[in-house]
Amino acid sequence: MTINHFLTTFAGLPVVDFGGGPDPADPAAVAWRIDMEDFEASEEEFAAAFEKMLERSGPAGPTALIVGEWGSAYETTAPIELLVGNASRLTGLRALFLGEMSSEQCEVSWIRQGDITPLLTAFPALERLWVRGAEGLDLTPLRHEGLRELVIQSGGLPASVVRAVGACDLPHLTHLELWLGVAAYGGDAGADDLEPVLSGRTLPALTHLGLRNAEIAEELAAAVAAAPVVSRLTSLDLSLGVLGDTGAASLLAGQPLTHLESLSLHHHFMTPEMAQRLVDDLPGVTVDVSDPQSEERWGRYTAVAE
């Protein structure tokens, strides 16, 4: 999945646009998507679209909700207050994707998020939370027993958010995916900021770890190679970043990875020989080394930055 193609399914449900087409036979069996055609739509226009979605999605509201362009997303914060203020009308909500926009609508590093802590507090039954964009993103560590999947996609994820995720008490989280990005867009996290997660002290149910789109992919590979949490993962994803032969060698020299079901490294800067060595040395693992990149004169680059 790239950020320039909208999801057709979310949380295992087909995506339906809030404003068009016939009503689904079961409004709780689809993922509803709100997206303003006018990139500069007002807050009032988005609120009206939200009401229209609620009218169509049934008495408990949507099971899964995708929020796309809410209007001037490059300068207007995500509609977190609107969602939280309507929590009593969204009792069925189990999956939320906040900020699914293409680069034509708003570059990923320009999307203004906000403090997502109130969302988790207001929706204790939420199982999946996806967030795209990290401008203004904030999180206060908390306990949430419902969350199973947390995905934060960014061109640059602040270290403060990375540390907050590691400090959260999420006893049932099985899937964590962080797009760390590049320093030029606020991605100032290092491997040390991930230590609580990598050590295995937090997130006791974790089985999938994605540290993607990272300018520090080589550093992450070295940290992951010795990370206690890896022994209980079934899948590891270090794709979309700048991983090269040094990082790949760290992975091979570290703890065994043969217990993994999958290892994703696509969009990388490894030589063909090293990529093949990874595949050969992990014969029982599905290793994705597709989409090799060539280092340009200005250096390596992540798949998603601006």
Image (cartoon, helix red, strand yellow):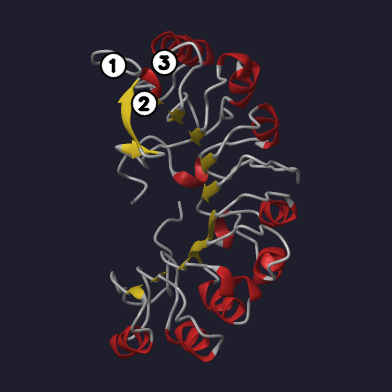
> Considering only order in the chain, which callout, 2 or 3, is on the residue closer to the N terminus?
2
Where residue 70 appears, as percent x and y from the top left, is 47, 24
Q: Is residue 122 above or below residue 197?
A: above
Q: Mark 1, mark 3: which one is toward the viewer?
A: 1
Q: SS of the residue at dot 2?
A: helix
What amino acid does circle 2 point to?
Answer: Ala
Q: SS of the residue at dot 3?
A: loop
Residue at 66% from the left image edge and 32% from the top image edge: 124
Q: SS of the residue at dot 1?
A: loop
> Considering only order in the chain, which callout, 3 or 1, is on the residue closer to the N terminus?
1
Q: Is residue 35 visible?
A: no
What amino acid does circle 3 point to?
Answer: Ser
Q: CA distance from mark 1 to mark 2?
A: 8 Å
Q: Which residue is mark 1?
A: 25
Packing grade of label 2 (10 A; few <14, some 14-19, many >=20) is some
| Number of the label disc, if any, that sits on residue 122 | none
| Number of the label disc, if any, that sits on residue 29 | 2
Packing grade of label 1 (10 A; few <14, some 14-19, many >=20) is few
Q: CA distance from mark 3 to mark 2?
A: 9 Å
- Which quadrant would residue 231 be assigned to in this image? bottom right
Q: Is residue 18 above or below residue 230?
A: above
Residue at 51% from the left image edge and 16% from the top image edge: 60
Q: Which residue is mark 3?
A: 57
- Which quadrant would residue 82 be assigned to in this image? top right
Where residue 139 appears, as percent x and y from the top left, is 70, 43
- Most foreground residue, 83 or 175: 175
